[in-house]
Image: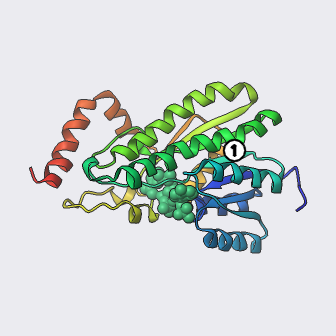
Amino acid sequence: MSVEPHKPVILITGASSGIGAATARLFAANGYRVALAARRLKRLQELQAELEAAGGEALAIQADVSDAASIQAMVQRTLEAYGHIDLLFNNAGFGRTKWLEELDPQDDIAAQVNTNLTGAILAARAVLPSMMHRRGGHIINMSSVSGWLATPTYSVYAATKFGLRGFSDALRREVGVYNIRVSVIYPGAVTTDFSTHSGASRKTALSTPKALVLTPEQVAKAVLSLARRPRRALIIPAITGLSVLLASLFPWLADWVQERIFTRPERGF
Ligand SMILES: NC(=O)c1ccc[n+]([C@@H]2O[C@H](COP(=O)([O-])OP(=O)(O)OC[C@H]3O[C@@H](n4cnc5c(N)ncnc54)[C@H](OP(=O)(O)O)[C@@H]3O)[C@@H](O)[C@H]2O)c1
């Protein structure tokens, strides 16, 4: 494959569906060469064919971000194909939204930590040498509003998304001198397959108001805006920042409200 140094390269984890796939489409349409990583290779190959048919450049890479060797191979493959990586979008992740005592130690707890947090850390570590060598790059980590505001049944998920915030702050302060940017994106609810993997069953009909629910395409646009103008953090929709602020200023109020409107009715108290 010929290497065109002028075309920027993005490596997207979790590109086989939802936000990752929407981001791949948007970046390909904006002239990026797109490395598509996830476990479901067939979906990635279909997306690669779709992007190529539209005149873009893409590469499907089967990778499991809960596996360190697989992450290393994913980065190596991208570098071999495209020569460098301008942007790593650490997007792969899932949530199991059950009470802590119901979560399986391996399949739910370790798997969420290994995928959402350790996977993103190891992928960032794997791209750093080439970014440091080139004196430039950008890492965008996918957190969630759950990275600021932890809600019942999201205990482990929130731990991973809070973890990404701390990781990103420290890393930004380590690599800024190499002209490497580190950003975090914090979306609220997004219409993807996320909830089909959550295992949740609810008594209450509580959900995010429709007006605040995002499409994957809206999140993709926010990622593109971060790529064009790197910032530390982006909470979307912006109004959600208000609840983050309120919960940070008055954590006792967040405890009280969530126990009253969610935990008590759900647990039958
Ligand atoms: N949907 C929401 O409401 C929402 C809100 C805020 C943040 N987020 C975050 O957005 C990210 C994307 O989720 P989504 O909403 O787009 O859900 P999704 O449609 O279920 O996509 C999740 C993606 O992650 C990939 N993935 C999961 N485990 C993986 C592993 N071990 N190795 C490699 N890839 C893996 C999946 O691909 P394979 O199964 O093919 O591996 C899939 O492409 C997640 O980090 C999620 O926490 C979602």
Q: Is residue 19 visible?
A: no
Is residue 103 left or right of 2 when viewed as pictured?
left
Q: Residue at x 22, y 43 (%)?
A: 258
Is residue 92 left or right of 53 when viewed as pictured?
left
How far across and how far down the image is residue 92, in percent? 55, 54
Q: Is residue 45 visible?
A: yes
Q: Residue at x 59, y 56 (%)?
A: 64
Quadrant of residue 168 within the rendered picture: top right
How far across and how far down the image is residue 30, in percent? 73, 58
Farthest left residue?
269
Quadrant of residue 45 within the rendered picture: bottom right
Is residue 3 left or right of 107 when viewed as pictured?
right
Which one is in front, 6 or 120?
A: 120
Does residue 28 sit above or below 111 in this rendering? below
Q: Residue at x 58, y 34 (%)?
A: 232
| Residue position for label 1 | 228
